Image (cartoon, grey):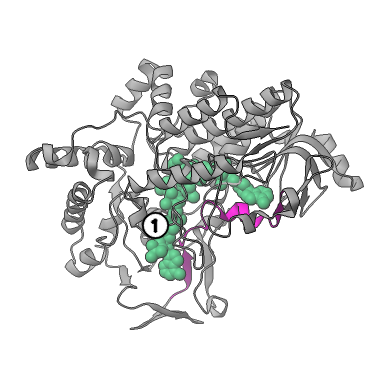
């Protein structure tokens, strides 16, 4: 296939495959492997220079996973699981990137990947019943099936602040960090943004920089990672019965094997609640604190407020300056409704003499100038500006392929003009033989993505093989099924607190983006059962030809 890819590049012909995959991150790599094993000819098209996706692009200081790495791993091959050992509870970006490279080598995946190749347009050709993909380099691709494994957090958001071009210093984005690293020693540095990327990088930038000024618009909840070796209790659960451990993850709400919590907050005494909270805080585990305190924390404001109060108490105990501590305390969203962060020394960093917090709620940024950043109250001169301002999440990378034209010349951006509609977050009516891995409408970002990616890839590849074997050439969601999924999404959303926060889950972080809660909030295990039921009921909600 490598030869085929090179040849078609050379002579300008079209590369013909059964299935084209876009993206070579966690999802694209596993897709390639499964598709090949199922006997499909395939190619993956990847804009980056190598595999890794998220872990290729996000090389900022402090970048790590925030789901324990023993859980944030492939599980499809028991031999792979024992061939690789993680060195820490939360692996660093370089280690995760090495792991994905190891996987690519082990299954010889690079030979079917065209790197530095961006897919720019996609068109369904009704006559041949094939997708035609245009690329910015090399041959276009003709395929029966078109699968976007383009990532939920892969399209960085533009800075949206006037004057960036005037700035004479250096500008960096956490999501596009230079491969050789950046020397910040002795520099005056500004970080804009206090989401997970900002919160992971700020403590390390503060250690290097002469002075660091953090520009915070909205404070976020952050919990200590307590990184180190993988905890003994989790390791013994995993090693005690690996298959059962993995299965529990697949059936769980979040893709991490924790039991379902049943006690609600008002059944517990104040002392019991505090005891549970302190244990969770000491565990250094997002999923633990999000799911193991009391059952109503994610669904009822009263149960949730108790968690918020405990965390705010921790912030005030760590941060010495009361005004800074107050500015760091979130009050505008329920805990968990926005992705909470996992940190190492984040709050304590504000006790350093070389760190200043600027609260943009009190003094908004007016402009970026030649020499730095001007707020409503002051000029801050800096040598370097780091944008930790996040992503056009979930739909950004999909919509960046423009247009994606389905049946009857319909374009996906028109179909999604009022928000991303889909059936199961996997397919869209009017777009035959088109699939999204962890698309909007699936649990995706509300879960351990490794588990959600494997579930989607397995489901899609199994269906493609089954349809091929039964002699079908096209598969497409029906309008009824898609409308029903939209209603189910909305019903589920009413049962959680996610709708009460302005976040990248709802599109609120991107000016002009339609407001809609994009991930499925019904849970990973229940979602898997639904997908399996669709299959067992003869591809319920799909039209096959
Ligand atoms: P990606 O890894 O984003 O890969 C998509 C690839 O598609 C990219 O390489 C991109 O270049 C390519 N691409 C996109 N559009 C095109 C195009 N038009 N043409 C060609 N190529 C294209 N999730 C967790 O579950 N746990 C974590 O701890 C965790 N940590 C994270 C930390 C960071 C810093 C970030 C940003 C995300 C994190 N996530 C985490 C989410 C993470 O994105 C997923 O876990 C996972 O890596 C996604 O894999 P993917 O293959 O679906 O997408
Ligand atoms: O992005 P974000 P992120 N002016 O959108 C601010 C995963 N991830 O890259 O909240 C001023 O969360 C913005 O402020 P506000 C994880 O799922 C995981 O940090 O919009 N400020 C916010 O503070 C995560 O949730 C890890 O008011 C502006 C920040 O920038 C997701 O990726 C690490 C602004 C953006 O926060 C995204 O995280 C990294 C502006 N114009 C990422 N625009 C792990 O730890 C934006 N902001 C595993």
Q: Is residue 329 visible?
A: yes
Q: Foreground residue, 536 or 441?
A: 536
Q: Quadrant of residue 145?
A: top right
Asked if the magenta segment contains residue 393, the reply would be: yes
In the structure shown, which secondary structural element does the residue marked by tag 1 occupy? loop
46 displayed left or right of 103? right
217 displayed left or right of 125? left
Place of residue 389 in the rendered image (x, y in percent of width and height, measured from the top left)? 46, 62
Q: Quadrant of residue 36?
A: top right
Place of residue 321 in the rendered image (x, y in percent of width and height, measured from the top left)? 19, 67
Disc 1: CA contacts within 10 A as few (<14), some (14-19) or many (>=20)? many
Residue under pointer 1: 195
Q: Foreground residue, 356 or 24?
A: 24
Q: Is residue 239 above or below residue 401?
A: above
95 displayed left or right of 3? left
In the displayed orientation, state which residue is furthest to the top: 241
Asked if the magenta segment contains residue 67, the reply would be: no
Residue at image x 88%, y 40%?
A: 7
Q: From the image, which quarter does the N terminus lie in? A: top right
Residue at image x 44%, y 62%?
A: 508
Mark 1 and ligand 2: say if the CB distance to the nearest ligand atom is below 8 Å.
Answer: yes
Q: Is residue 209 above or below residue 19?
A: below
Place of residue 49 in the rendered image (x, y in percent of width and height, measured from the top left)? 67, 48
Residue at image x 44%, y 52%?
A: 517
| Range shown magenta | 382-406
Q: Foreground residue, 456 or 299?
A: 299
Q: Quadrant of residue 521?
A: top left
Which quadrant of the render holds ligand 2? bottom left
Residue at image x 86%, y 44%?
A: 14
Report the label total. Answer: 1
Place of residue 15 in the rendered image (x, y in percent of width and height, measured from the top left)? 83, 41
């Amino acid at each position: 296939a490598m030869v085929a890819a090179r040849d078609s590049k050379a002579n300008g012909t079209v590369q013909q495959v059964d299935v084209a995959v876009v993206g070579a991150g966690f999802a694209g790599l596993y897709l390639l492997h499964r598709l090949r094993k199922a006997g499909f000819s395939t190619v993956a098209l990847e804009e980056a220079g190598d595999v890794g996706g998220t872990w290729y692009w996000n090389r900022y200081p402090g970048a790590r996973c925030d789901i324990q790495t023993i859980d944030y791993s492939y599980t499809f091959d028991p031999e792979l699981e024992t061939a690789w050992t993680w060195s820490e509870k939360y692996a660093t970006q370089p280690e995760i990137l090495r792991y994905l490279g190891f996987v690519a080598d082990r299954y010889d995946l690079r030979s079917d990947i065209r790197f530095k190749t961006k897919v720019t347009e996609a068109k369904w050709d009704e006559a041949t019943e094939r997708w035609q993909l245009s690329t910015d380099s090399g041959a276009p691709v003709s395929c029966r099936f078109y699968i976007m494994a383009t990532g939920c957090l892969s399209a960085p958001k533009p800075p949206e602040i006037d004057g960036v071009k005037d700035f004479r210093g250096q500008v960096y984005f956490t999501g596009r960090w230079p491969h050789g690293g950046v020397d910040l020693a002795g520099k005056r540095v500004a970080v804009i943004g206090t989401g997970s990327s900002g919160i992971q990088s700020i403590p390390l930038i503060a250690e290097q920089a002469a002075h660091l000024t953090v520009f915070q618009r909205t404070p976020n909840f952050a919990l200590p990672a307590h990184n180190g070796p993988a905890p003994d209790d989790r390791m013994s659960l995993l090693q005690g019965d690996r298959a059962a451990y993995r299965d529990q993850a697949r059936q769980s709400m979040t893709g991490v094997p924790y039991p379902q919590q049943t006690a609600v907050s008002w059944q517990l005494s104040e002392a019991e609640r505090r005891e549970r909270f302190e244990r969770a805080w000491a565990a250094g585990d997002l999923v633990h604190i999000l799911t193991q305190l009391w059952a109503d924390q994610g669904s009822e404001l009263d149960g949730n407020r108790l968690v918020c109060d405990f965390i705010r108490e921790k912030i005030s105990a760590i941060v010495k300056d009361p005004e800074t501590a107050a500015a760091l305390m979130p009050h505008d969203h329920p805990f968990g409704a926005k992705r909470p962060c996992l940190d190492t020394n984040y709050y304590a960093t504000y006790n350093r003499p070389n760190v200043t917090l600027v609260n943009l709620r009190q003094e908004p940024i007016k402009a970026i100038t030649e020499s730095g950043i001007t707020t409503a109250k002051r000029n801050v001169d800096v040598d370097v500006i780091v944008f930790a301002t996040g992503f056009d999440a979930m739909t950004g990378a999909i919509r960046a392929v423009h247009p994606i034209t389905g049946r009857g010349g319909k374009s996906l951006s028109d179909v999604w003009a009022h928000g991303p509609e889909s059936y199961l977050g996997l397919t869209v009516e009017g777009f035959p033989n088109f699939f999204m891995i962890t698309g909007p409408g699936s649990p995706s970002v509300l879960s351990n993505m490794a588990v959600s990616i494997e579930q989607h890839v397995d489901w899609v590849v199994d269906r493609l093989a089954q349809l091929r074997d039964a002699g079908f050439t096209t598969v497409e969601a029906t309008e009824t099924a898609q409308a029903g999924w939209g209603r189910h999404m909305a019903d589920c959303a009413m049962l959680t607190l996610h709708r009460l926060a302005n976040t990248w889950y709802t599109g609120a972080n991107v000016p002009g983006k339609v407001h809609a809660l994009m991930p499925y909030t019904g849970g990973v295990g229940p979602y898997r059962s639904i997908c399996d039921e669709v299959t067992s009921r003869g591809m319920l909600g799909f039209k096959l030809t």
